[in-house]
Image (cartoon, rainbow, N blue to C red):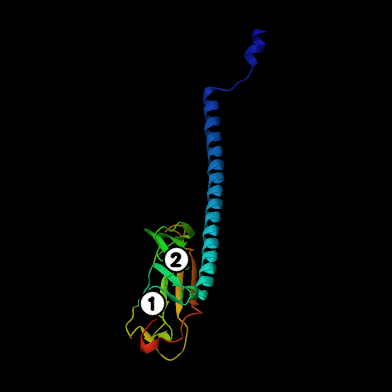
Amino acid sequence: MTGRLGDDQGYTLIELLVVMALLSVVVGGIVTLFASGLNSEADQNRRFQAQQDGRLALDKLRREVHSACTISTPNTYNTAFASATLYFPSDNCASGSHSVTWCTTGSSGRFALYRIVSTSCAGGTVKVADYLTSGTIFTYLPPSSHLVTSTSLGQGTASTAIVTQDLASTLPRLHVDMNLRLRAGLVDGYRLVDDIALRNGPRACPGGTASC
């Protein structure tokens, strides 16, 4: 019995430690790969959701701008701004109970777009889009106007940037430029740009004024 027990083979402590070290390396690599896959999937889902929200927001904004006749600050034309209040014919194209305000809030390269039935952005709680890289996404272009060059957008009201009352009889437009990006390090941002006509707006301003 003693001789047979002496022939039994077993693992030494060093062998056990080596196996455990190798196993921890292999399992650690698998866990890291699995976690990376989960993070990548979550990132793709957030990116898709941000793009989807941006498209839906622009579609809703487009419908409301088409129904509007002017904005609250038409004299601030060809200048990018963060809040646009739309006036509708149901309120005689003036501030009223049907006025809708679209505005952005945020900082440090991340802004959110809100919509509220009001003449100001105060109290806006309905977030319609997120992860905008800039807050100044709106630019108003008055009726019967054209930009001097393709780079004149947002360059102010000087005649070197925009010509008004050019007898083109074009409707006023609201230029919208949304650039969506989850974080600053990403290079594949998603951009939505549109010139939306205010279909109930005038084709020329009375008295030769630049904007109305």
Q: Nearer the viewer, residue 138 or 41?
A: 138
In the image, farthest residue toward the bottom: 167
Task: Say which amino acid is labelled 2.
Answer: Trp
Q: Earlier in the sequence, mark 1 or mark 2?
A: 1
Question: Does dot 1 land on a helix, a strand or a loop?
Answer: loop
Rendered-image quadrant of the C terminus? bottom left
Q: Going by the image, does 104 lie left or right of 14? A: left
| Spatial CA span between label 1 and label 2 | 15 Å
**Picture coordinates of residue 149, whole percent (x, y):** 40, 84
Which residue is disc 1 drawn over?
A: 74
Q: Going by the image, does 152 lie left or right of 192? A: left
Question: Does dot 2 land on a helix, a strand or a loop?
Answer: strand
Q: Quadrant of residue 73?
A: bottom left
Q: Nearer the viewer, residue 95 or 169?
A: 95
Q: Which residue: 43% across, 91% down?
A: 167
Answer above or below: position of 93 versus 112: below
Which residue is disc 2 drawn over?
A: 102
Q: Quadrant of residue 123?
A: bottom left
Q: How many marks on residues?
A: 2
Q: Which residue: 54% across, 66% down?
A: 55
**Picture coordinates of residue 33, whole percent (x, y):** 55, 46
Q: Nearer the viewer, residue 62 or 3?
A: 62
**Picture coordinates of residue 69, whole percent (x, y):** 47, 77
Answer above or below: position of 126 versus 20: below
Q: Which residue: 64% across, 17% down?
A: 8
Task: Say which amino acid is labelled 1.
Answer: Pro
Rendered-image quadrant of the N terminus? top right
**Picture coordinates of residue 56, whole percent (x, y):** 55, 64
User: Residue 146: which numbered mark, if any?
Assistant: none
